[in-house]
């Protein structure tokens, strides 16, 4: 009986487990269905309260905006590929191609201060096993302090050591309390200077009075710092490059360092820094990029543009890929360290290296380029470290023997270069990134004043160049109505009509050749007259949010014709939030950065949409001949300020809850959606208040 009971109990247990499993599955399905229904109900409530949907496009594709941007990028890649294929024809052709890439890189990086006195000093030392670490502080430009650790080999002979600059991967601690790679380099006769980048280690910028970081991590800090530099015509990566290049200056200034044999390397975010240093500083004689090198376009599609220190605006427009940066080293030794299972795409790394290897072959330097990948992820395992040390030993020391790698660990007890732990708290004259940006803004005031005093035609042309627009947008050529059998390349396509109690509602898709479509809803009240004005509404939450607010329905009672629209990235064309990580503080991060990458900032692209809408309102038979007023908020503020200057037919613009001056971003980077409002280098020419003045009273900010 006991055995039978046990058997039955066991059988009952299995049945119970199966029943429990089935119940869990059913519950899970129920939750999914309920979630889906709740989501649908939420969408119906929030997006289309009390009415059918306000969709005006003929299609529905959440990815359409990003795909549109990437189509342009692929076309530019095809052009670059053709140029590179032609360069493979001969050594002279390849050298000419590389010289052009170097010129483009210098153009991207922009101008820098003079290489003045570094005011360098050694503020302490730490002893290691076979090496010593010096704690260094220097000024890469006046009042900008850089902290670093110099790992020096211990030698009984008086000699000069070859040296490397090690650039830190992403981590708030920066250079931290010790670098295992630098230790192994030093024990193999190579000095290493490990440099804190802006936003990391003792060079964090977004901190409180005690040095506590105010963001969730270094990638967020970099992302928030980037817009200010972009607006001023530079980039965060260019500023980090300058610090690293000045670190090379420091190494060359030392009597114990061989200035003829300087190398650089870095992993992850440090790999990014290494890519720009080797591309822009000709003194680098051997280089390695780890866990960053891939194909830029493939990276954008797979994981997005990464944080604000991993790109310079305009790279895509100039056709610069990771392989091009590597070619700036040619024919000097170049090594890629790749993780087979890294999120940095391995296929992209293979594709890029194939281009680099072929170029080195053409230059007769095949043995000076190599790719080594470990069976690992986003990490530097021992075999990769050994390969890196061996590579530098071979090309900087002239020693091809295997490096001596020990299991020596080092974590210094007191590795800070400042007593306060942060340069901006340590030095009374230290200038933070925010202070630097505001100072540069003030220095450019006279330049902006002179620019805005020009004839309006000259101002408009330069605005078009900054916004990435063809000057043809100033011609005001109307969009024709759609014709049967037309390609809809430049047309107005009716997509629906609704009979309301007191109004007629029309929907249109506006197509402009080479641009994203614009979704439009036109509401004409029954009481409208020939004198009734048009009120064009552009809201960052989309036209459905505006039209769905039942209180707004009363606005048509005075006869005003309402036109509500969604332009690219808004409403019907909003990029899905799942592709825009919250750490970037931007609802459309990937599209905003890709647009800058292509030299076509979002502000400019949306200005085209507004001009298309103004054109539609001026020429559509339902609307033509009426005064046009525009109401906007949020992200549409800078867009409409530009549009009002470019198109004098826009008679009145009213803005709420919007950016009033780009200086706000410079002084306070802890804000959302900044990159969406960035126009590269614009503060060398004008600020938003200048646009309001140039619009001659047609733009009003009411909050």
Image: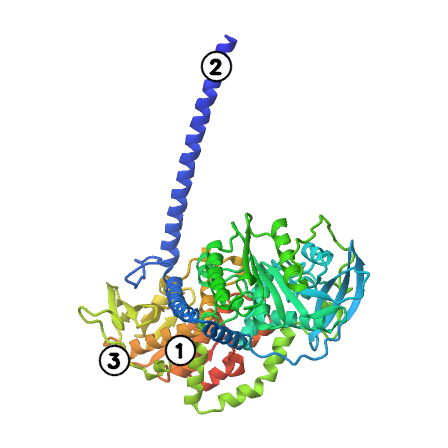
Give the residue pinned by disc 3.
530
Above-or-below relation of 292 to 701: above
Q: How crowded is mark 3: few (under 14 residues within 10 Å), some or many (20 or more)?
A: few
Give the residue pinned by disc 1.
469
Q: Which mark is residue 7?
A: 2
Under circle 3, the secondary element is loop
Where's residue 93, x and y in %? Answer: 45, 74
Q: In this view, does 90 lie to the left or right of 375?
A: left
Where's residue 604, x and y in %? Answer: 42, 75
Q: Residue at x 54, y 63 (%)?
A: 307
> Colour scheme used in the picture?
rainbow
Where's residue 631, x and y in %? Answer: 40, 74
Above-or-below relation of 402 to 445: above
Looking at the rendered image, the disc whose residue lies closer to the viewer, 2 or 3, is 2
In the foreground, 269 or 578: 269
Q: Residue 120 carries which label?
A: none
- Is residue 598 at least partly visible in the picture? yes
**What is the quadrant of residue 81 in the picture?**
bottom left
**What is the quadrant of residue 543 in the picture?**
bottom left
Alpha carbons under labels 1 and 3: distance apart:
35 Å
Give yes or no for contact between labels 2 and 3 (Cβ–Cβ under 8 Å). Answer: no
Above-or-below relation of 339 to 568: above
- Is residue 697 at least partly visible in the picture? no
The numbered mark, 2 or 1, whose residue comes first in the sequence reads 2
The numbered mark, 2 or 3, whose residue comes first in the sequence reads 2
């Amino acid at each position: 009986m006991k055995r039978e009971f046990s058997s039955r109990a066991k059988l009952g247990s299995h049945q119970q487990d199966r029943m429990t499993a089935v119940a869990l599955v059913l519950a899970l399905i129920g939750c999914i269905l309920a979630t889906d229904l709740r989501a649908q109900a939420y969408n119906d409530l929030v997006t289309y309260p009390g009415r059918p949907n306000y969709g005006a496009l003929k299609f529905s594709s959440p990815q359409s905006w990003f795909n549109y941007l990437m189509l342009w990028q692929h076309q530019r890649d095809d052009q670059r590929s053709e140029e590179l294929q032609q360069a493979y024809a001969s050594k002279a052709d390849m050298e000419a191609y590389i010289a052009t890439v170097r010129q483009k890189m210098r153009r991207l990086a922009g101008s820098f201060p003079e290489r003045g006195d570094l005011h360098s000093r050694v503020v302490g030392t730490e002893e290691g096993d076979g090496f010593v670490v010096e704690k260094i502080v220097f000024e890469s430009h006046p009042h900008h302090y850089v902290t670093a650790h110099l790992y020096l080999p211990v030698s009984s002979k008086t000699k000069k050591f070859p040296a490397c600059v090690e650039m830190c991967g992403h981590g708030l601690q920066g250079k931290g309390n010790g670098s295992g790679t630098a230790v192994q380099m030093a024990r193999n006769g190579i000095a290493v200077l490990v440099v804190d980048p802006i936003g990391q280690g003792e060079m964090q910028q977004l901190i409180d009075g005690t040095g506590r970081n105010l963001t969730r991590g270094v990638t967020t800090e970099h992302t928030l710092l980037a817009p200010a530099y972009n607006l001023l015509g530079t980039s965060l990566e260019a500023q980090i490059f300058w610090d690293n290049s000045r670190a090379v200056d420091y190494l060359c200034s030392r009597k114990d360092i061989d200035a003829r044999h300087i190398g650089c390397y870095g992993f992850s975010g440090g790999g990014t820094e290494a890519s720009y240093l080797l591309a822009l500083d000709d003194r680098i004689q051997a280089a390695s990029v780890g866990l960053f090198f891939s194909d830029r376009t493939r990276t954008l599609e797979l994981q997005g543009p990464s944080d604000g220190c991993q790109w310079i605006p305009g790279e895509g427009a100039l056709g610069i890929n990771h392989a091009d940066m590597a070619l700036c080293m040619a024919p000097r030794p170049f090594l890629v360290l790749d993780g087979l299972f890294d999120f940095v795409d391995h296929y992209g790394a293979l594709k890029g290296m194939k281009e680099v290897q072929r170029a080195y072959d053409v230059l007769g330097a095949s043995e000076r380029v190599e790719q080594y990948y470990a069976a690992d992820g986003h990490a530097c395992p021992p075999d990769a470290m050994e390969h890196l040390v061996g590579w530098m030993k071979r090309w900087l020391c002239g020693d091809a023997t295997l490096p001596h790698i020990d299991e020596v660990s080092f974590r210094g007890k007191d590795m800070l270069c400042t007593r306060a732990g942060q340069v901006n708290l340590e030095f009374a004259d230290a200038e933070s990134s925010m202070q630097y940006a505001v100072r540069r803004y003030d220095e450019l005031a006279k330049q902006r004043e002179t620019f805005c005093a020009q004839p309006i035609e000259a101002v408009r042309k330069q605005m078009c160049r900054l916004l990435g627009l063809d000057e043809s947008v100033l011609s005001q050529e109307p969009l024709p109505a759609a014709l049967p059998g037309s390609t809809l390349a430049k047309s107005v396509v009716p997509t629906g009509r609704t009979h309301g109690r007191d109004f007629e509602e029309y929907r249109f898709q506006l197509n402009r050749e080479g641009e994203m479509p614009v979704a439009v809803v036109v509401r004409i009240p029954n009481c409208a007259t020939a004198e009734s004005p048009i009120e064009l509404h552009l809201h960052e939450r989309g036209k459905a949010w505006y039209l769905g607010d039942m209180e707004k329905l009363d606005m048509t009672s005075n006869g005003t014709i309402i036109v509500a629209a969604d332009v690219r990235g808004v409403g019907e064309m909003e990029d899905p939030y799942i592709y825009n990580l919250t750490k970037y503080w931007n609802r459309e991060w990937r599209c905003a950065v890709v647009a800058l990458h292509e030299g076509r900032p979002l502000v400019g692209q949306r200005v085209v949409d507004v001009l298309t809408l103004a054109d539609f309102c001026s020429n559509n038979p339902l609307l033509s001949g009426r005064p046009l007023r525009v109401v906007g908020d949020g992200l549409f503020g800078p867009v409409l300020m530009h549009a009002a200057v470019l198109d004098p037919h826009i008679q009145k613009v009213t803005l709420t809850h919007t950016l009033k001056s780009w200086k706000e971003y410079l002084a306070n980077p802890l804000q959302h959606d900044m990159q969406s409002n960035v126009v590269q280098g614009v503060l060398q020419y004008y600020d938003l208040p200048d646009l309001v003045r140039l619009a001659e009273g047609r733009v009003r900010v009411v909050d």
